[in-house]
Image (tube, rainbow, N blue to C red):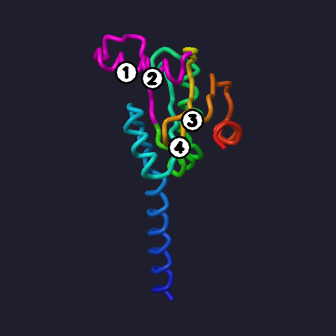
Amino acid sequence: MYKNIILTLVLVGAITVTVNGQNKKKLRWLTNIEEAQKIASNQHKKILVYFSGSDWCMPCQELKNEVLSSEIFKNKALLDYVLVNIDFPRSRRKLTKERINYIEKIAEKYNNSGAFPFVAVLNNKAEMIKAIDGYKSETAAYYIENYLK
């Protein structure tokens, strides 16, 4: 009887470690749409481009904390999207001239209104499917159900 109890405890522990290990998988945020397009084409996924002002835009920080860091978003993203973050920090001195030119070119193409936060959903050919302008304090479930289906 003790052998059965010990075996059960060992199995439950192994299952718990496996499940927890799967949940700890981190999202990979790229900074280049061309790289994302190659991956998206190979994996038959869409591209989600998040335009942020990470150190000055409060709604950007809320979107990141409430939606983009949530487990429900992580699960959806791992299945359906290649992720790209195009960040516009307050101080551009931290960026190279090449990076500034790149993010400005990408913003002109996909976010020409200059909205923050702004999410562009692209197909695997980097063509716009959907634009999500701003963040209105929605829950992660609401955001996914209404904007990312």
Identify the residue at horizontal 45%, vertical 86% (top origin).
3
Q: Earlier in the sequence, mark 1 or mark 3?
A: 1
Q: Is residue 84 above or below residue 104?
A: below
Q: Residue furthest bottom?
A: 1
Q: Circle 2 sits on which residue?
A: 106
Asked if the stretch drawn in magenta spans residue 79, the answer is: no
Label located before the other in sequence (2 or 4): 4
Pointer 4 local density, CA inside 10 Å: few below 14, some 14–19, many at least 20: many
Does the CB distance between marks 1 and 4 fall below 8 Å?
A: no
Estimate the x, y position of residue 78 in percent, counting from the top left. 50, 49
> What is the distance, in whole Å, between disc 1 and disc 3 at their CAs?
19 Å
Element marked by disc 1: helix
Residue placed under numbered mark 4 in the picture: 46
The image position of residue 85, as x and y in percent, is 45, 30
Q: CA distance from mark 1 to mark 4?
A: 21 Å
Local crowd size for mark 3, using a 10 Å CA cut-off: few (<14), some (14–19), many (≥20): many
Which residue is denoted by mark 1 in the rendering?
A: 102
Circles 2 and 3: CB distance less than 8 Å? no
Between disc 2 and disc 3, whose residue precedes? 2
Asked which secondary structure carries label 3, the reply is strand
Residue in the image at 42% along x and 37% along y? 29
Left or right of residue 136, residue 98 in this image = left
* Dots 3, 4 in contact, CB < 8 A: yes
Q: Which residues are magenta?
A: 84-112
Gap between marks 2 and 3 measured at Cα: 13 Å
Residue drawn at 43 percent across, 57 percent down: 21
Query: What amino acid type should be assigned to the residue bearing mark 4?
Result: Lys
Instruction: Tell me whether circle 1 and circle 2 mark residues in contact (CB < 8 Å).
Output: yes
Q: Earlier in the sequence, mark 3 or mark 4?
A: 4
- Label 3 sits on residue: 121
Q: Amino acid at mark 1?
A: Tyr
- As helix, strand or loop, the secondary structure at mark 2 comes to helix
